[in-house]
Image (cartoon, rainbow, N blue to C red):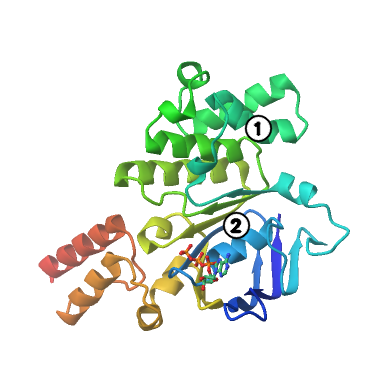
Amino acid sequence: MSIKIENLTYVYNPGSPFETKALDNVNVEIKSGEFIGLIGHTGSGKSTLTQHLNGLIKPTSGKIIISGTDITDKSVKLRDVRKKVGLVFQYPEHQLFEETIYKDIAFGPLNLGLSESEVEERIKEAMEFVKLSFEELKDRSPFELSGGQRRRVAIAGVFAMKPEVLILDEPTAGLDPRTRDEILEEIKMLHSQYKNTVILVSHSMEDIAKLVDRIIVMHRGKIALLGDPREVFQQVETLESIGLGVPQISYLIRALKAKGIELREDIFTVEEAKEEILKWIRSNKNA
Ligand SMILES: Nc1ncnc2c1ncn2[C@@H]1O[C@H](COP(=O)(O)OP(=O)(O)OP(=O)(O)O)[C@@H](O)[C@H]1O
């Protein structure tokens, strides 16, 4: 599903002393099947933007057109929007409430009106995606699990709805590095398999650099940068001026350049850097 955001502005508490313009005339188009990384400092407007996409927040002004339908239009039923646009909130495990993992994951698919057997299939598939054993865990309480496993149950609940647009707001916040990498990999696999449109909100450039087609950088309610990761990471000055670092590897490439070692500047993974450095060593040995 494609998403077109037109002149989107949102003001919290308008007219009060606490008035905050969280989004300021945002315009962006996301193609169907794109994997987008949404990045920005705390308070830059990321959550406010994503919450507009499933109708949780109504714009102060502007439009959100999903697959040709303006979801801000009064005639559009939000129930229908939420069937297609799945949102994984920050710390989603805080919203687990059923007594078993099965029931928790079943909640969304049951609301879609699927039969019991279809729901069970969806649960099995979603649990497989997030690497939780269906047989071992289905009847256990989510509260007996570790923090990382609870996060996986919460994510599986949204995966099980097979949303055409999947939005994940900081899905790896507060997790250990290994669980973080695994969950990001699972999201990537889901996207490769279903070709759904994915928007992944993150504070971390490193986390999203390897995964996404394009990055949107937000700053003070506006889009500060938009492009593929290579384009965005080359804007080191702009990123630093808004308080966001580039991946550590970009700094290494710059430091090597200062020492006369010229490598491609659009490298942002350790693997690519290793390859380029080895190439440079080989060509300089032969020189
Ligand atoms: N419920 C609210 N009431 C009033 N102001 C709010 C509310 N939620 C967010 N804001 C303000 O709106 C602005 C954007 O906040 P938002 O939560 O969208 O940013 P964010 O980029 O998602 O931040 P974080 O990375 O910390 O989640 C901030 O100035 C924030 O203080």
The amino acid type found where label 1 is placed reads Phe
For disc 2, the marked residue is 34
Indicate yes or no: mark 1 CB to ligand 1 under 8 Å.
Answer: no
* Nearer to us in this view, 22 or 286: 22
Q: Could you tell me how far apart the alpha carbons at marks 2 and 1 are, in whole angstroms?
A: 27 Å
**Left or right: 269 as drawn, with respect to 89:** left
For disc 1, the marked residue is 107
Position of residue 58 measured from the top left corner of the image (x, y, whole percent): 72, 65
| Residue 31 visible within the image | no
- Vertical order, 160 against 51 (above or below): above
At a point 42% along the width and 34% down the height, the residue shown is: 149
Residue at the far front in the pictured view: 17
At a point 60% along the width and 79% down the height, the residue shown is: 19
Helix, strand or loop under label 1: helix
* Nearer to us in this view, 182 or 136: 136
Residue 240: image tag: none
At a point 54% along the width and 24% down the height, the residue shown is: 100
- Vertical order, 212 against 186 (above or below): below
Helix, strand or loop under label 2: loop
Position of residue 68 measured from the top left corner of the image (x, y, whole percent): 80, 61
| Residue 103 visible within the image | yes
Q: How crowded is mark 2: few (under 14 residues within 10 Å), some or many (20 or more)?
A: some
The amino acid type found where label 2 is placed reads Glu
Position of residue 184 measured from the top left corner of the image (x, y, whole percent): 43, 47
**Left or right: 285 as drawn, with respect to 239:** left
On-image quarter of the N terminus: bottom right
- Vertical order, 117 against 16 (above or below): above
* Nearer to us in this view, 45 or 18: 18
Q: Residues within 10 Å of mark 1 (few under 14, many from 20)?
A: some
On-image quarter of the C terminus: bottom left
